[in-house]
Image (cartoon, grey):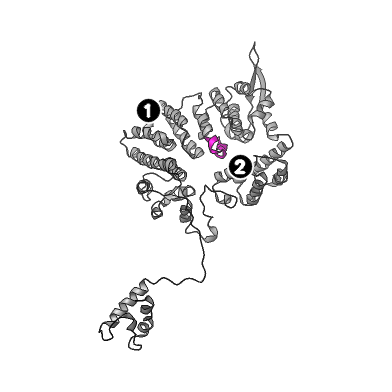
Amino acid sequence: MKRAAVSSLLPGFVVGTSRRTPDYSRLALPPADPKADLKALALLAMALRFAPPLAPDTFFAASPRDSARRLVTQEQRALMLRLFASGKPALAPQDDLAFAVALALERARVAPHPFDFHRLEPFLRTHAERLGADALAFIERDKAVEERRGYFDAEFVVDDNWNDAAPARRVDFLERRRSSDPRRARELAEAAWPGESADMRFRLLKALRVGLCIEDRAFLEGLAKDRAPKVRDLAARLLGKLAGADPMLAEAMTRVRVGSQGLLRKRLALTMELPATVAKDGWRNWVRETFAEIDIADFVSAVGATEEEAVEAAKGDAPLLGAMLLMALRARRFDLIRKIAPLGVDPLWLLIEDFFADSLDLPPEDRQAFAAAILQADAPNARGAGLLTQAMNRLLRILEAPLAASTFDHLLQMAMKADAQAVDAALSSHLVALAPAERLARLRSRLEAGASDAAAHTLLALDLLDSLESVSTHDN
């Protein structure tokens, strides 16, 4: 029996069978059957129920957004709902463990299940950039079409979509693009420049320091009228470097006093003279603005000493030692950080005060080296559990990845030395968030001894991280 034969009965039933007698000959129904009308009506209803919709005259084709990502397993899905389901989630979306889970999903190329998007919405809104294009599309579902961003997996940043990526990814992309094609990188920055905030313009301009060349002169000269003073100052400094001079270094050296110390054996002595408007304990912002763009090699050359001599000569002068830490970070001389820290400044305290903002723009391998340097440096004062907790929070945001195994082992020893009880309570979740895959089993045995609700939630997050790290390590 053909569907068309059944559908042909529709006009008769619409106008009424008494006015237009249906033809049941094609339906294999006996004409004398008293229930022929009811049977035909039932067949017609089924035909209409399963009839395909009419094809539209025009089509809007959209390619799949997230074909490169697999979905979480049922076990992982259950753990995510227990931890992050809206209402009363076990972990707040801003928690370090929630951030660590989002990072692990990104590394493993795994996406949350679409059926759970509504229940996980607070978690998705906080970390959508790391959860794939479908999550991005979901959280922007109520926006007007013209307000929506291009949906793409944030790992695949290219010339066409780099403006839609997160700020740190944009800076990293522009630096890498600058290394491979300086002219094209500058053109991308110029095209995006009018719509950027002052902070983002400053970060993009810092990325253009890579491969600085004479062809950049016209662009840099055009920044003399930029609205942001820090952008104008950095552009002037880069122009000075092109001309063979560094105005920022010359200005900074007016605050450095070069002398000598010792009776029999004269040694170099360096001190920092702070401006009258800068309080003795409020030197951090001024030092960061003055020295963050200076290379340590240029500084030691200006004082006429070797790096080791300059570091030793600044012993006890916290502002000058802090400036040297910034200059070492600028030059990616992480070995010098270990030499500077014991002389009178703890880089972990500076870390939690956001003194090392430039560390966000380091490539991943250099971020790990930076974390190892500041954690393994001998600090002048004892490091308590409170300091370590805040420092681990900052390190996770800088690294956007677990610590290297050797660095994590050192951190765990520091935590046990600071407060053995705190390792099982306040520090435990931060340790899990920073733990590499090969150290999760050791942490599980420690946490299983705890009986608090916080420990139970941390164990759930540890199980989810362990499962995701296994996917990332073995299944990709």
- Say if the magenta span includes residue 292: no
List the residue tagged with mark 1: 420
In which quadrant will I find the C terminus?
Answer: top left
| Residue 40 position in % (x across, y down) | 31, 80
Residue at the extreme bottom of the image, as rendered: 19
Question: At x 43% / y 29%, what residue is drawn?
Answer: 409
| Residue 329 position in % (x across, y down) | 58, 32
List the residue tagged with mark 2: 175
Q: Nearer the viewer, mark 1 or mark 2?
A: 2
Q: Is residue 351 visible?
A: yes
Question: At x 29% / y 79%, what residue is drawn?
Answer: 39
Q: Is 62 situated left or right of 458 in this image? A: right
Residue at the extreme left of the image, as rendered: 34
The magenta region covers 354-367
Query: Please, what is the three-letter code of the amino acid marked with disc 2?
Result: Glu
| Residue 347 position in % (x across, y down) | 53, 30
Query: Please, what is the three-letter code of the amino acid marked with disc 1?
Result: Ala
- Rendered image quadrant of residue 455: top left
Question: At x 58% / y 22%, what residue is drawn?
Answer: 315
Of residues 166 and 89, which is closer to you in this image? 166
Q: Is 151 situated left or right of 237 in this image? A: left
| Residue 141 position in % (x across, y down) | 47, 58
